[in-house]
Amino acid sequence: MHYDSILNNHGLPHDPFKAIVAPRPIGWIGSVSKSGVKNLAPYSYFNAVSDKPHFVMFASTDIKDSITNAEETGVFTVSLAVEALFDNMNGSSVAASSNVDEFKLAGLTPQTGKFVDAPFVSESPAALECRYWKTIDFPGSDRTKGTGSYVVFGHVVGVFINETFIKDGLFDTAAARPLVRLGYMNYGVVGSENTFSKNRPTLDKDGNLEKVKDWDGKYR
Ligand SMILES: Cc1cc2nc3c(=O)[nH]c(=O)nc-3n(C[C@H](O)[C@H](O)[C@H](O)COP(=O)(O)O)c2cc1C
């Protein structure tokens, strides 16, 4: 199979795009409306996009509460969605009206950020506090109708970590067991059973790759 992605003529019952670009991290976006209603929703078109400075993005298909709140208040948070909170995460994706507190709906405890005035999930092992930077409206988007695709960027200005998940000075991602989004209605979990460590490669004096040594626990 080799198909035209603009025509999307794959002939399959469902578009395989998201099943190929997988796994994707889930950005669990916390925000608050202008009138003070707390909002929470998962976004798998989400990622970290810059290390220095720390920036993240999430993409909204159509105008939804998270993008509206981020644009109107200038802040949002990203909580780590983990296996133990799957039902809460899934619950927070329901199409609730903008006057519904989705932390309450999903059975979670909001904690106001230390650096931004937006709530994050206090039960989550880690959360990022973000200042809204800008939105890129993708071609074909129409704000008058609220349709299209919108990429929201945020500058991470604060980081919350539940210190239970810090081991030997490192954030233990595998112990947190983050959920990842696959295609269709499929999910995965990152845990010690499917992660491993390897050192970066080095060259010998003749310019050939040396055998990669096991990681000694020092990040370089
Ligand atoms: C795991 C998961 C990932 C999702 N990813 C996205 C996404 O990347 N973009 C999007 O627009 N909606 C996504 N959704 C759907 C939104 O979470 C859903 O539309 C939600 O009601 C939006 O809430 P809001 O209006 O409070 O922002 C996802 C849902 C789930 C369960």
Image (cartoon, rainbow, N blue to C red):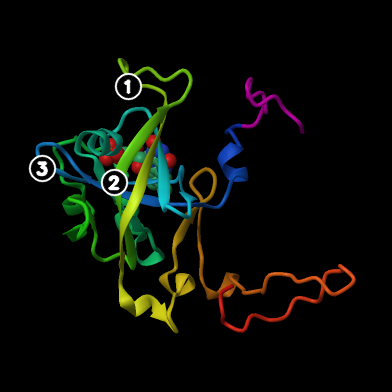
Magenta stretch: includes residue 2: yes
Classed neighbour count for the residue bearing mark 2: other residues with Cα under 10 Å, few (<14), some (14–19), many (≥20): many
Going from N to C along the chain, the mark reached first, 3 or 2, is 3
Would you name the residue on which mark 2 appears? 131
Tag 3–tag 2 contact (CB < 8 Å) = no
What residue is rendered at 72% in x and 80% in y? Answer: 213
Would you name the residue on which mark 1 appears? 146
Say what amino acid the circle numbered 3 marks.
Gly
- x and y percent of residue 207 in the render? 86, 67
Q: Nearer the viewer, mark 2 or mark 1?
A: 2
Secondary structure mostly taken by the magenta-highlighted segment of the chain? loop
Quadrant containing the N terminus is top right
Seen in the image, is 38 located left or right of residue 1? left
Going from N to C along the chain, the mark reached first, 3 or 1, is 3
- x and y percent of residue 195 in the render? 58, 71
Cα distance, mark 3 to mark 1? 22 Å
For the magenta stretch, what is the residue range? Answer: 1-12
Tell which residue pokes out farthest to the front in this image.
Answer: 205
> Which of the numbered marks, if any, corresponds to residue 36?
3
Cα distance, mark 2 to mark 1? 23 Å
Cα distance, mark 3 to mark 2? 17 Å
Say what amino acid the circle numbered 1 marks.
Gly
Say what amino acid the circle numbered 2 marks.
Arg
Classed neighbour count for the residue bearing mark 1: other residues with Cα under 10 Å, few (<14), some (14–19), many (≥20): few
What residue is rendered at 59% in x and 70% in y? Answer: 194
Q: Is disc 3 placed on a helix, strand or loop?
A: loop
Classed neighbour count for the residue bearing mark 3: other residues with Cα under 10 Å, few (<14), some (14–19), many (≥20): few
Going from N to C along the chain, the mark reached first, 2 or 1, is 2
